[in-house]
Image (spheres, helix red, strand yellow):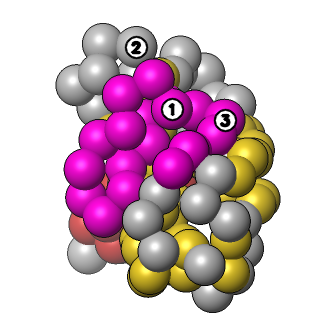
Amino acid sequence: MKSIFSVSIFIVTILIFMTALATEILEKEQSLITIISPKNGEVVAPSFELTHQVQHGLAPHTIHVFLDGDYQKGATSSLKHLQAGPHELMIKISTDEQDSLVGWDRVNITVK
């Protein structure tokens, strides 16, 4: 009975260690992105600068900007000639292979 208990403790310890190791590896692989400007709820001009911060992990990244769900080809640092009204601005970051989304951020803005 004592050996079964010891084996059970050993197995649980190994599982806890493996879970912690897997979590650490995933966190190191993940890159996070944050929209710095404009802020959520901000009123902006029809053309404005978009600033973001990328916290680099091990994975390379590609940044994509979306406005109201539509991809804004070539836009990574500014948006121009937007229609007045409320909009959702989203930035997604993926690996260079573009097959793996590793982070995103979203803000709601109003164009005056």
Find the magenta span and give its range.
63-81
Left or right placement of residue 74 versus residue 54 in this view = left
Q: Label 2 vs label 1: CA separation?
A: 17 Å
Which residue occupies 68% across, 65% down? 45
Which residue occupies 53% across, 16% down? 60
Q: Quadrant of the C terminus?
A: bottom right
30 or 99: which is nearer to us?
99
The residue indicated by pointer 2 is 96
The residue indicated by pointer 3 is 77
Callout 2: SS: loop
Which residue occupies 40% across, 14% down? 96
The residue indicated by pointer 1 is 75
The disc labelled 3 sits on which kind of residue?
Ser
From this view, report whether residue 49 is shown above or below residue 31: below
Looking at the image, do the residues carrying marks 3 and 1 touch, with CB atoms under 8 Å apart?
A: yes
Q: Label 3 vs label 2: CA separation?
A: 19 Å
Q: In which quarter of the image is the N terminus?
A: bottom left
Left or right placement of residue 102 versus residue 47 in this view = left
Callout 1: SS: loop
11 or 33: which is nearer to us?
33
Using a 10 Å C-alpha cutoff, classify the residue at mark 1 as few (fewer than 14 neighbours), some (14 to 19) or many (20 or more).
Answer: some
